[in-house]
Amino acid sequence: RIQYQTYDVTSMLKVGDNAIGAILGDGWYAGQVAHVGQYHYGTHPLWLLLQMEVEYEDGSRDVLISDDKWKGSTGPILFSDFLMGETYDARLELEGWNYPAFDDRSWIFVESSRKPKFPVGKLVSQADPPVKVMHQLSPVEISQPEPGTYIFDMGQNMVGWVRLKVSGEAGTKITLRFGEMLNGDGSLYTENLRTARQTDVYILKGQGEEIYEPHFTFHGFRYVEVTGFPGAPKFHAITGMVAYSSMDETGYFECSHPMVNQLQSNILWSQRGNFLSVPTDCPQRNERMGWTGDAQIFVRTACFNMETINFYHKWMRDVADAQLPSGAFTDVAPQVKGMGAGHAAWGDAGVIVPWAIYLCYGDKGIIEEHYDSMTRWIEYLKVNSKKLIRPNEGYGDWLNVDDETPRDVMGTAYFAYVTNLVSKMAAVIGRKQDETKYKKLFKNIKKAFVDAFVTPEGRIKGDSQTCYVLALKMELLPDNLRVAAAKRLAEKIAERDGHLSTGLVGVSYLLPVLTDYGYLDVAYDLLTKDTYPSWGYSIKNGATTIWERWNSYTIEEGFGDVGMNSFNHYSLGSVGEWMYRYMVGIEADPEQPGYKHIIIQPHIGGGFTWAKASYESLYGQIVSHWELKNERLELEVEIPPNTTASVYLPVEDASQILEGEKPLDKTDGIIEIKELQGKTLLEVGSGKYNFSVVYR
């Protein structure tokens, strides 16, 4: 599958002659991809496929195509690669090369072919938003660790490149190197980049102020090392150009705890930095692959922060394209040579992501498009299991803290979970027989799971935090064992002095499960901890994005394993889902997805005095803002037009609830009032509400 882009160029046309020019770069096609080197998808020469359609005022049409009448040449870009960087010699610029009057007699005619010598695949219109520069950052500090070497601190770990402004003599060579951290002596830390050079070189042409931005590369960095600069650079010499897929930001979250606000910022910046056409694991080292496990763990958080529907539509096609004949989904998508397939929590992204997109956007199309792929995955899991128990293989709960979850336990849990999701999606698209079939299979896998791994007292093989999180989240335990399992999870946390031990797989479900089973205080305590391992620990150590490891850096031991130590890795930031869905309580209703019906159920605790969030749904803005003030709980709610909502308040007696200064029975928009155990449920229509109740 090869995406083409469509542009309206009408406004660019001039009366008289016009010209079209294109600059080609290696990119994904022929550049460095992860650890496998160049030419993973294609080889040189590079090809341009262009078709320009012109419609005149009289209705006649012309079609211009790229063919052997075109000419080509080399230019100032001597080298450009996603991972390695770019070398640009401004002395070789061709003034006016893309204008009609340019003298191209020294250029050569290009090779043209109706059957280009590259793996064409299927040409499709680009589905996802294009990558653009979305923000610009100015440096906050310049240091000089040694003479002639300057370090610009952008104040934020970011992804993109920099704009360089410089004046100097022709032939002066300026080298820009990029890194996420500094060594103890103030020099640039690059060991975690592995073979990715992340280096741009600019050679001046010597004609006044020169402005340069690279063309076919991007970097993950907070710090820019500049050498060769004529004189001492000023702050305006460098501007950070933040680039990512141009999605609107749809979520806003803020609360009374400064560290948690920084956590939300770190989550958002990691999403920005890793959503460049593909949801990558990291943006800096020689990896930058679309790891499926990371993507599915983070998908609900991602959908709050940004309008991701088209981004995930495109990526799910990458996932489907990479699916093996056996039905196994791959560990990364687009597929990269040498990477595996069929592993629990990774391959399951092929089911979990479509379900999440359906919940968040009400989009049945993504289910219908990928339904066959999803059922092939279920059959793969079934065939490659023994009596419905998955083998002890895969990555496990990646980067857990000395608390391994047996891989057969994890694999079987995910087998059950995605089977249940496929049953639900079969119902959504009217596949009644399949709904029944997969519901029965889910029931049988649950029984196999309990028989193989669960004691009569509710202990699960492995006895890790993630064991209990998965079993409870994925509804694998009989009713009589769930309370015991939740209690054991809380005990496991207490045994670690109130710390988590989950890795990538368990982390997103940990706080939701604790909250659902009555351990809200434990959930808040985990969220706000700043000792290792915790989200706050990285923030206490200066993080501005989510780290790959809980201990990517410690004051005591320094940097973590350089073989795998990204400082911009969104997966552990999947806790953002809990902050939106539980702390402020904005939730989608699976029965009326896409926020057609909204659930507002904030969970107050942790010593927080207020929290507020908004989410720009397809119907409009949803707001939930609670505050504790003068022994009252105030809850501001906004429900968009053409939707309804269920609003929960933590009081049994509805007569104690006011809306503004009025009792509920005098309030417009209240459809129904239900007094429940420990809370009141209000069914409301669209509008703005200000509820308050005594809260001590």
Image (tube, grey):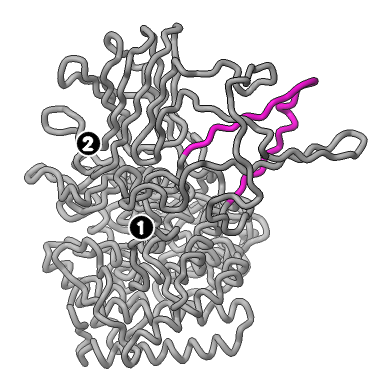
Q: Residue furthest left?
A: 556
The picture places residue 180, in percent across and down from the top left corner, at: 26, 37
Which residue is nearer to you in this view: 628 or 580? 580
Q: Residue at x 51, y 65 (%)?
A: 321
Check whether the beta carbons of the residues at disc 1 and disc 2 lie within 8 A of each other: no
Which image quadrant is residue 508 in?
bottom left
In the image: residue 276, left or right of residue 500: right
Whether residue 210 can be seen here? yes
In the image: residue 490, left or right of residue 55: left
| Magenta stretch, residue numbers | 3-25
Q: Secondary structure at mark 2?
A: strand
Q: Secondary structure at mark 1?
A: helix
Residue type pointed to by label 1: Ser
Point out the image quarter for the C terminus: bottom left
> How far apart, in angstroms, are the residues tagged by discs 1 and 2?
23 Å
Which residue is nearer to you in this view: 589 or 658? 589
Q: Main secondary structure of the magenta part?
A: loop
Which residue is nearer to you in this view: 458 or 413? 413
Which image quadrant is residue 389 in?
bottom left
Q: Residue at x 54, y 18 (%)?
A: 94
Residue placed under numbered mark 1 in the picture? 574
Whether residue 628 can be seen here? no
Residue placed under numbered mark 2 in the picture? 181
The picture places residue 74, in percent across and down from the top left corner, at: 50, 27
Q: Residue at x 36, y 67 (%)?
A: 346
The picture places residue 9, in percent across and down from the top left corner, at: 71, 33
Point out the image quarter for the N terminus: bottom right
